[in-house]
Amino acid sequence: MTPIDLRSDTVTLPTPEMREAMAQAPVGDDVYGEDPSVNTLQAMAATMLGKEAGLFVPSGTMGNLASILAHCTRGDEIILGNLAHTFLYEAGGIAALGGVHPHTIPNQPDGTLDPEDIRAAIRGDDAHFPPTRLITLENTHNRCGGAPLSVEYTRSIGELAAEHGLILHLDGARIFNAAAALGVSPAELAAPVDSLTFCLSKGLCAPVGSVICGSQEFIRKAHRIRKQLGGGMRQAGILAAAGIVALEKVVPRLAEDHQRARNLASGLAALPGVVLDPGTPQSNMVYLTLGNGITHDAREVAGLLKEKGVLVGVTGKRRFRLVAHYWIDDKAVQQTVAAFEEVLQAQS
Ligand SMILES: *Cc1c(COP(=O)(O)O)cnc(C)c1O
C-alpha cells in the first residue's frame, strides 16, 4: 500500500503529464543560454510574477543564496525573521559563502515582521556597524503555520525599505499558495519586492528546481553567482519542462489543496486529544498539538500512524505538521482522520 504522505509538499511526485513533457522536452546547453525549455520557463515565471527576468536554479536554498549574494557584499547585514527558512534551514549559507551577517528580529505569529522592529534593526552610519543592505520576507511563512502575507503588508515593507535605501527580497517558496489563499495574483504579491525565489518542487509537484525573479540587472548578477555555486546546468530543459507543466497545470488547482487542508482540520478538530493551532490551516498546512490526555509523544504517535499507512511531520515534542498536496485526495483525508481517531482512542 502506498502511504498517505502528509509530511511535506516536497514529497510530491511529478505528475504523469510532467513525465511526458520531460521525455519530449527540447533541450540545449543552458550554460550557453541555449536550452529552449529553460528559456521558456524563465520567461513564463517572470511574466507570472511581473518581473523583467527569471533564472532557473536547482533549489530554493540556492535561489535565496544567489539572490542575497547578488544584492550584498561581504560584511553587509540583512534583516530577517528568527523563524525564516533562510535563517533556520539553509545551513548558514549566506554567512558561510557570502560573509553576510544575519540580523534576526522576531517573526510575529502571522509570519510578518513588525515594522517597528525592522526600523529599530536598521543600522546608522557608524564605523562600528555592519551596513544594513536588505530585508527578507517569507510568503507563505512555513514555520508560522503556512500564513500568507498580504499585498498591503508587503507593500508597506516595500515602502519602508525604499525609505531607507534597502533592498527587499522575498523567499516566496510557496508564493502561489499565498496567492491562492488570498485570492490575489502572484504578481500583486511580488510587485513591492526587488527579487524573489519560488519553488517548483513543493506543492507544484516538479521533481527539481526553483526560479529567481527580478530585474534584468539583478538576474545577470545572480546568473554569475549560480555558476560560482556550481548551479550552472547543461540540458536542464528536462527539468524545466516539468516546471512549465507546474506553472500551467498545477498552479491553478492549489485552492483544492487548501480546501482539503480545511477538511482535514475540521475532521481532526472533532477528535479528543487533538488541539489545532488557532486559525489553522492558513494555506495547505495543518498544525496541531497533542492534548494533555495523550500519554504518547508526537514521535510515538507518528510511529503508530505510520503502521496505519499515514506519514505525518513531527515538528515538536507534541506537535505535528500535515501538508495537503496534489497526491492527497478526499479519501486520503478521510483515512487520515480515521487513523488519528484509532491511534488516539487507544491512548486515552
Ligand atoms: C523549502 C523551502 C526553501 C528551500 O527550498 P529547497 O528547494 O528545499 O532548497 C526555502 N524557503 C522556504 C520557505 C521553504 O519552505
Image: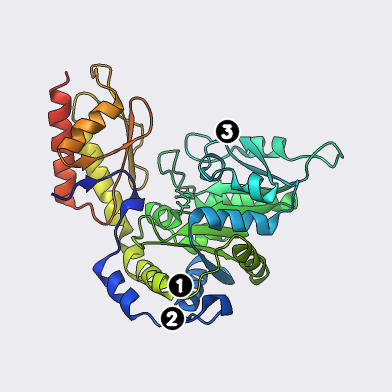
User: To which residue does mark 2 refer?
Assistant: 27
Q: Would you say the beta carbon of the disc 1 residue lies within 8 angstroms of ligand 1?
A: no
Determine which of the numbered discs, if any, sits on residue 53 in the image.
Answer: none
Give the distance between the C-alpha atoms of the residues marked 1 and 2, in whole angstroms. 7 Å
Where's residue 130, x and y in %? 78, 41
Q: Are dots 1 and 2 in contact, CB under 8 Å? A: yes
Q: Nearer the viewer, residue 290 or 8?
A: 8
Tag 3 secondary structure: loop
User: To which residue does mark 3 refer?
Assistant: 106
Where's residue 133, x and y in %? 72, 49
Where's residue 29, x and y in %? 51, 79
What residue is at 42 percent from the left and 71 percent from the top? 240
Q: Is residue 309 left or right of residue 219?
A: left
Q: Amino acid at mark 3?
A: Pro
Residue 152 sits above or below residue 237 on the image: above
Give the distance between the C-alpha atoms of the residues marked 3 and 2, in whole angstroms. 45 Å
User: To which residue does mark 1 refer?
Assistant: 236
Q: Amino acid at mark 1?
A: Ala
What residue is at 70 percent from the left and 47 percent from the top? 99
Q: Nearer the viewer, residue 197 or 66?
A: 66
* Quarter of the rendering containing residue 18: bottom left
* Quarter of the rendering containing residue 316: top left
Q: Residues within 10 Å of mark 3 (few under 14, many from 20)?
A: some
Q: Split into 4 quadrants, where in the image is the C terminus?
A: top left
Mark 3 and mark 2 lie on one chain; the one further toward the N terminus is 2
Tag 2 secondary structure: loop
